Amino acid sequence: MNERDSEAVAAQLVAKGYAMTPDEQHADVILLNTCSVRDAAEQKALNKMETLIGQTRKRNSTAVLGFMGCMAQSRGQELIDQLPDVDLVLGTQKFHRAGEHLNSLLTGQRNKVVDTSEEAGSEATIREHLLNGASAGKAVTAFVSIMQGCNQFCTFCIVPYTRGRERSRSIKDIVGECHELANGGVKEITLLGQIVNSYGRREIGVKDGKSAFVQLIEAVHEVEGLERIRFTSPHPKGYGDDLVEAYACLPKLVGNAHLPVQSGSDRMLKLMHRGYTRARFLELVSKLRAVQPEMGIGTDIIVGFPGETEEDFEQTVSLCREVKFDNAFLFKYSQRRDTPAVAMPDQIPETIIQERHARLLEEVDAIRGRKLREYIGAQIEVLVEGPSHRNAARLEGRTRCNKIVVFEGGERLAGQVINVKITDATRSTLYGDPAIMNLN
Ligand code: SAM
Ligand code: SF4
């Protein structure tokens, strides 16, 4: 989501005549987009800004330095009080105002700007893309922000405080953006929101037994030129049968679901205010796998939530063994300001969190590695995205179930859907050979 917000701000500035530089030491404007989900992310952004201030002020006393995003929203003026060299603090409903604020700072009309107020309609302003932007090649995949905010108030999470209440864009507006992306060569889009299956609940509502989110997917499915549709993140609570069935009816909707579970213990799920049980989560996984046996299922898990006993933790380990997630992001619980979990009894010591995190990481990595090795020898459909991130001499793409495949090939293949024969696998990546495929 932050990548998408940063892209929209960069696109806005490029449209106003700014040029992007890959080297921050040449920049006249540096905005750090920040995440508040864990304290470590906030500390990283603060440290980075301190380094930037040291480097930038020496060479350019009038350069504009700013924070944007969730930490900007939650800390506001406090950031300038702490780091007086910061000029701009831009909240999560104000990304589209970056250009006008920079103008007033660069022309000396204003000395500092802190803009974190709510703004009606801001959910529809994350719209512009940099299709040929920072990277050399043309974009094959793109993120589309369909809504902002969250009403769930999980007891550990700062997002409802930094991103505000749920607000959805219109289907027409989103489909218009997808058309523009497809016309620009994009083949795959990922619909983004904190709880995408809550999309349009109030604004659009259910029609012919279909939730607003399924109505949206159906409308995007009609966009010519798009080959694949993904979305992230759906919430296990309220994941309706209409959305499960969509996988069977809509061929462009790829077989992948990122389903954040957070814990395998019902006691923890209740304390976290997640709104589902372990049994309900497992039932959802079974329904999805019944529709598509090859469905890739990913998750997010928090280790060390207040009150988590060894037994609760073991239930998370057993859930991972049972589901065999294709991908799992593990987070060490981090106390966030204003959230109810901070005041809960039995906060878990850091050493125990570290130890449980390492144990679970080994478990989920081993499961993922075993699942990836099962693909060796198979032919698999890959959308070629471009040069591999690790080794630009090779190509990289994704399977429908969201696995990364690295293989040899010319850049002209970028944007094409090809079959690749899988020849090797590590714990995170598949390796393949399109040449072998051609001989078969
Ligand atoms: N809205 C999505 C959902 O609930 O399904 C997830 C969005 S959240 C910003 C991304 C992930 O960050 C969560 O799934 C959770 O695992 C993690 N997270 C949120 N608050 C956290 C905290 N206080 N400490 C550690 N991890 C946290
Ligand atoms: Fe945070 Fe829960 Fe909302 Fe996800 S659903 S953004 S974890 S409050």
Image: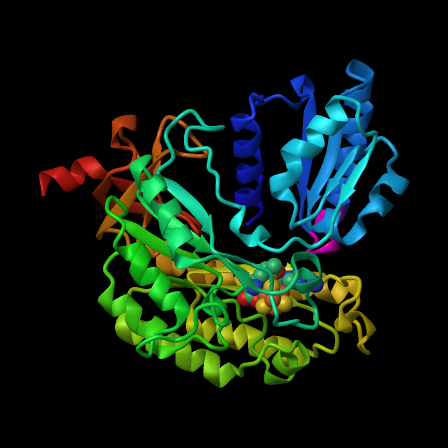
Residue located at (28% from left, 47% from top): 226
- Residue 81 versus residue 374 in the image, above or below: above
Whether residue 41 appears in magenta in the rendering, the answer is yes
Residue located at (40% from left, 34% from top): 388
Residue located at (75% from left, 21% from top): 107
- Percent of width and height locating residue 281: 47, 78
Can the viewer see residue 96 in this picture? yes
- Percent of width and height locating residue 227: 26, 48
Q: Is residue 237 left or right of residue 188?
A: right
Q: Nearer the viewer, residue 76 or 368?
A: 76
The type of colouring in the image is rainbow
- Span shown in magenta: 36-42
Q: Is residue 395 left or right of residue 277?
A: left
Q: Residue furthest left?
A: 440
Q: Quadrant of the C terminus?
A: top left
Q: Nearer the viewer, residue 210 or 395?
A: 210
